Amino acid sequence: MIALGLEASARVGSVALYRGAEGERGETVEVELCAEGGHARALAPAIQDLLASRGLAARDLDLIVVGLGPGGYTGVRLALATAKTLSIFLTKPLLGVPSTAALAAHARVPAGAVLAAVDARHGLVYGGLYHKDEHGLPREVEAPFLRPAAELLATLAPATFVAGDGCDVLRRAAGGAVNGDPALVPRAADLLALGLKRFARGQRDEERTLQPLYLRPSEAEIRFERLRREERSDRRSEPEERRKR
């Protein structure tokens, strides 16, 4: 079994390659994407180099696993497009995994309640709630969402460990300490491990319908809605006789 994992939703992306016989532990190798120039320039060369380092070619892959976000729009879209292209061209199965699940599966995240939290800017947090068992497997408690940090803090159980840079957003909103690690990012190796478990259960995704977890409108939609609100506000402030004309 040879499987490729692509994760590009965070500021640091990664590519992972698994190789092993069915039922065995196997070997996973992971490389980070070079930050200079962005994920767009680094993803394809990283895949080629990683395969070549093990004497493999893309046609040798048995499975492609990709992180669906939520997170950076460009990185998520690029990784998914690359994964879909490989799946269609090579006629290989494809699985999409929420990047928040990979974040919760990180080795430095302790067992118990976990909030995988990603800074969505403007005081917002992309999140997903999980319970991580003693084997390191996160079980989804609440699917990925987008919420204001203050609202999220009001419902967060005290013992929850917060993984990801959304932890800093929550700390600023709380004005104090929040239990967690803001330095953590989703890793392709963890993503791949979760995808392999799904694959072993016979699960597959349809490449033509698999979509990223954006969870928020685009900047253009946000600006359009802001202009609409401003226009309505201006109309309400006009003198009554002017509005009747």
Image: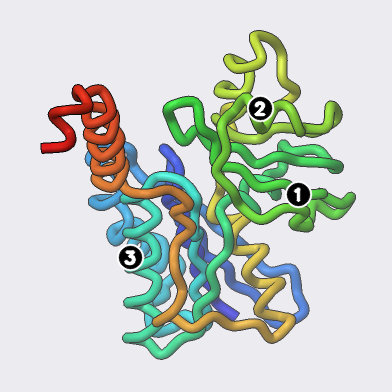
The x, y position of residue 161, in whole percent, is 76, 32
Q: Which residue is mark 1?
A: 130
How far apart are labels 1 and 2 at the CA level?
A: 16 Å
Q: Could you say which is closer to the camera, residue 52 or residue 76?
A: 76
* Number of other residues with Cα within 10 Å of mark 3, as a class: few under 14, some 14 to 19, many 20 or more: few
Q: Which residue is mark 3?
A: 48
Q: Could you say which is closer to the camera, residue 73 or residue 242?
A: 242
Point out the frontmost of discs 3 and 2.
2
Question: Which amino acid, mark 1?
Answer: Tyr
Mark before the other along the chain sequence, 1 or 2: 1
Q: Which mark is residue 207?
A: none
Question: Which amino acid, mark 3?
Answer: Gln
Residue for point 28% across, 58% down: 45
Q: Answer above or below: position of 1 versus 183.
A: below
- Do we see residue 185 in this rendering? no
Question: Which amino acid, mark 2?
Answer: Asp
Residue for point 61% across, 52% down: 144
Q: Which residue is mark 2?
A: 181
Point out the frontmost of discs 1 and 2.
1
Q: Is residue 90 left or right of residue 110?
A: left
The residue sitting at the left extreme is 245
- Do we see residue 74 in this rendering? yes
The x, y position of residue 214, in whole percent, is 44, 54
